[in-house]
Amino acid sequence: MGEIEGHSLYHELRDALAGEACALCALTQRGLRRYLDALAHEGVGDERLRAEIRAARGFCAAHGQMLRAARDALGAAILQRDVLESLRRDLSGVQPQLGSLEGRLRRAMRRSSPAMLRPPRPCTACEQLADIEGAYLSGLLGGIGTGTLLDALGESAGLCVPHLRAALQRAPDVQTFERLRAAQLLVWQRLAGELDEFIRKQDYRFTIEPIGPEADSWVRAIALISGRPGLAAHVEPER
């Protein structure tokens, strides 16, 4: 993305890197939540968008739960009523999966089988997620490449493994790749030290010692290794 300092994306990334979790997870989840909130509140009036949701037969499990969290019962009800009507039509046309020649001929003629219940297009929130993640990944790599976000990344909680993998794959040059790797290794070194300290203090000989910032190191380690549900699965896979 080149020089991004002064761009709103830069400030969003700076703020998120000061948080206690993977900045890309936090920003992507926030962006997706805003999308679903707007969809539930205002999107019901957009017929094109409603047609896309009908074609996707609603949302995947993770993003369906996020729509529920938007707490707009009327908007959600209207969207789900649309989807339900499409599913009713699908199910009405489904034919049994008979193994006989007659069954195969009937399916061929009517082109209707249980596979018809699979949505013709992906979950619209998953598609939006890919766009949001891509924008923040590009912004982060641009900031690392120019050095404007390098120190912030090194001092941050680091990237979760799924987002780290995606960032390494998209690194535009060797310098950016090496800077990203060095910053993440520094983060992991700090976290490993906190985990060691937490584990040591679980020994009965040291339980009298007060617990410090390492108290939640194991929680942060889980989040950093696994990523957040509903996000990591949509990161660009390895090639």
Image (tube, rainbow, N blue to C red):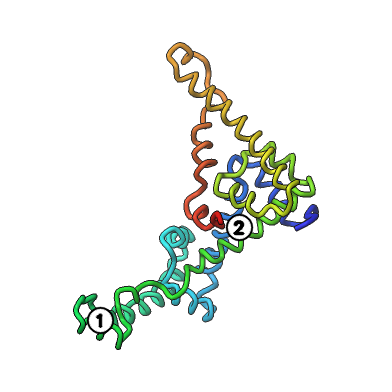
Q: Do labels 2 and 1 touch, CB within 8 Å? A: no
Residue 202 spot, x, y in % from top left: 45, 20
Q: Is residue 53 above or below residue 26?
A: below
At 79% across and 52% down in the image, what residue appears? 5
The residue indicated by pointer 2 is 133
| Amino acid type of the residue that numbered disc 1 sits on in the rendered structure | Arg
Q: Is mark 2 on a helix, strand or loop?
A: helix
At 20% across and 84% down in the image, what residue appears? 102
At 74% across and 57% down in the image, what residue appears? 8
Res. 176 mark:
none
Outermost residue on the top side: it is 205
Q: Is mark 1 on a helix, strand or loop?
A: helix
Residue 230 spot, x, y in % from top left: 48, 55
| Amino acid type of the residue that numbered disc 2 sits on in the rendered structure | Glu
Please tell me which residue lies in front, 9 or 101: 101
Residue 83 spot, x, y in % from top left: 40, 75
Tell me the quadrant of the picture where the N terminus can be found: bottom right
Quick check: 29 left or right of 106?
Answer: right
Q: In which quarter of the image is residue 194?
A: top right
Quick check: 43 left or right of 58?
Answer: right
The local crowd at label 2, few if under 14, some if 14 to 19, many if 20 or more residues have their Cα within 10 Å, is many
| Among numbered discs 2 and 1, the one appearing first in the sequence | 1
The residue indicated by pointer 1 is 104
